[in-house]
Image (cartoon, rainbow, N blue to C red):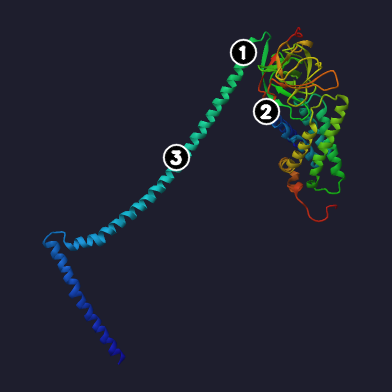
Amino acid sequence: MRRRVSQKKNRRMRTFRLVLLFGLLLPVLFIVIVSTVGSQKFGSLHTFAFDTAVGPLLNYGRTAIAYIQGIKNDYLALVGVREENKRLWDELQECRASTYRYREAMIANVRLRNLLEFKKSSEYPMVVAQVVGKDPSPWFRTVVINRGTNDGIEERMPVVTDNGVVGQIFSVSANYAKVLLAIAPTSAVDVLIQKSRVRGILKGTGSGIYLLEYILKTVDVAEGDHVVTAGLGGLFPTGLPVGIVSRVVKKRRGMFQKIEVTPAVDFQNLEELLVIQKEKPFQE
Amino acid sequence: MTVVVFILTGVLLVVIQTVADLVYPLELYNPDLYYLLIAFLAFRLDLFRSLLIVFPISWTLDIVSGIFLGFYPVLCFGGYFFLKIAADRLPVKTSYYHIPFVALSYVLVSLLLYLVISFFSPESLADGSWKKLAVRAVLILVLAPPFFRLFERIYSAVTERNRHHHGRLFTLKRGNRYR
């Protein structure tokens, strides 16, 4: 019984589909074909479909493709940008390195030119030496230079730069020498204050200043006064700049004043030095 | 071979320390790397070979630094014997625990030398050495572990028999430390 009812239902559905096909779809198809092939005109149906469905779809499609293409282009551009970025960075590094080299060369040029001018203007024979080592200990103040007895260097020869006194040769080998810096505590140089022409002994402290000793309280010394070598003792020639008075203290007790002198030479950045070759002590 | 390698290592450390100040003015923060090697030798090598190494290193230091010949041999040998005796007599044998003694020995030997020089030549030493000494002692304390590891690697590389003891210097052992 149930089977018969089901067969009946199927038959009805089939009939309905046939009616739908032949009654609706075929006429529509017919109309479309006739209107298209017949008049060859872009009919209202075309226009309707174009406006409402196809056109917007195309628009969306184009937008989607543009979007995808944009992503692809962006990605490709990104890959290119990465490569370009790397190339530009390399180029920048090279430029920086060469700028640094040029700057260094320029500074060295200025420094060496000053040294050369100083050497030319000096009446004493001089040897240019380069600092190759600095005393690593906290107690002493020496540097090692790359000139020795083979270059005519001897012990106790004065060492200077174009800025002023650096120290004296302490020990020497065939190709190297150790320079005792003027700021070393063991160092003492006969100097005079350029303005007042008063003589004193300049002692190193081991730090960045000198102490000018044995200057009487009666002597007029002011900050900014230039201190130069006196030439006494025959170690240094007369008139080499040593430093500038940076502090003057006159205590109530004692005969002498305490005078601090800032070195004319930057001892932190010693690179090229001049060793004055003297055969006999300098005359006063 | 060990002696030659460690002499070269010591000389290299002295050169580094001497040249480093030129590149960048370290002044106060220039650690005494050679002293770390001296300490390592005291803990690790036998007396004879150690002395063969310590002498050329201290001699090199005398060349590049200071104004008193013999200053560095006294400093290096003083430090070496201090540490050697300490290492032999201390109940704890693991060298990890000996690191404070490295800084302590450096300070003590330096102070001793400072006092001797101050007595005989009072104007020879730079002012403010106390602070510098303290800073350098701290630097030695900080740098001792990595440098000891480096020296241990060098030692292991040059001696076959030490292969089994590789890394022993800094192995923190558990259990009874007084055995």
Q: In which chain is the residue bearing label 1?
A: A
Query: Could you tell me which secondary element the residue under label 3 belongs to?
Result: helix
Q: Which residue is mark 1?
A: A117
Question: Taking A100 as reference, is A174 above or below it?
Answer: above
Which mark sits nearer the N-terminus, 1 or 3?
3
Share a chain, discs 3 and 2?
no
Residue at the location (86% across, 33% down)? Answer: B112
Label 1 packing within 10 angstroms: few (<14), some (14-19), many (20+): few
Q: Quadrant of the C terminus of chain A?
A: top right
Tag of residue B22: 2
Residue nearest the observer in this picture, B94 or A123: A123
Label 2 with label 1: CB-CB less than 8 Å? no
Q: Amino acid at mark 2?
A: Leu
Q: Residue at x 59, y 22 (%)?
A: A108
Q: Report the chain holding disc 3.
A: A
- Give, as a three-letter code, the residue at label 1: Glu
Coordinates of residue A10 in the picture (x, y in percent): 26, 83
Residue type marked 3: Glu
Q: Position of residue A208 (x, y in %)?
A: 73, 26
The mark found on residue A84 in the picture is 3
